[in-house]
Amino acid sequence: QVQLVESGGGLVQAGGSLRLSCAASGRTFNRYATGWFRQAPGKEREFVAGVSWSGGNTYYEDSVKGRFKVSRDNAKNTAYLQMNSLKPEDTAVYYCAAAPSAYSGSSNFGDYAYWGQGTQVTVSS
């Protein structure tokens, strides 16, 4: 069992930065790949970025490549999403999720077994 809690969301101006954290409980966190998803009002939940269980492999949705960086620190049971050069279209609730390592980098939210409660990111123009 893995419980996930996101933090770090907030209101930022376009061009600004935020760093989201995903704190996990449970000793098996380092056996799971981690994904970040987001959901804007009226839109489907979409994959943003993912990181393998070791942190050695990272994956990004095209619109965030070069602006976002995903990472994890297994010693701290925490995953991160560094978001730079934020745009108004990045506004959404951001969720972290954990998937079995075989689904590392998956953009299919059905592959993720555990989810956090989400954190709101609002980017003003």
Image: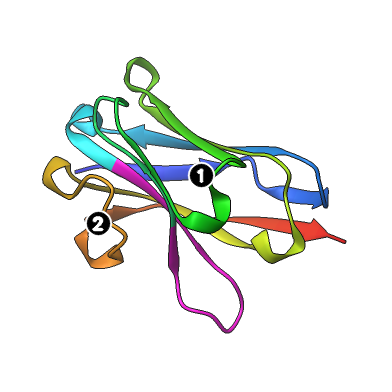
Q: Residue furthest left?
A: 102
Q: Nearer the viewer, residue 108 or 93?
A: 108
Q: Residue furthest bottom?
A: 42
Q: Residue at the location (28% across, 48% down)?
A: 105
Q: Amino acid at mark 1?
A: Glu
Residue 86 visible in rendering? yes
Dot 1 falls on a residue whose secondary structure is strand
Q: Is residue 79 left or right of residue 13?
A: left
Q: Residue at the location (46% across, 77% down)?
A: 44
Pointer 1 residue = 6
Q: Amino acid at mark 2?
A: Tyr
* Crowd rating for badge 1 (residues with CA inside 10 Å; few <14, some 14–19, many 20+): many
* Crowd rating for badge 2 (residues with CA inside 10 Å; few <14, some 14–19, many 20+): many
Q: Any mark on residue 45, and which?
A: none
Residue 21: percent from the left, percent from the top?
Answer: 52, 36
Q: Which residues are magenta?
A: 34-47
The question of residue 35 being in magenta is answered with yes
Residue 122 occupies quadrant: bottom right
Q: Check the image and report above or below for 106 versus 5.
A: below
Q: Residue at the location (45% across, 55% down)?
A: 61
Q: CA distance from mark 1 to mark 2?
A: 16 Å
Q: Any mark on residue 112, and which?
A: 2
Contact check, label 1 and label 2, Cβ < 8 Å: no
Query: Which mark lies nearer to you, 1 or 2?
Result: 2
Dot 2 falls on a residue whose secondary structure is loop
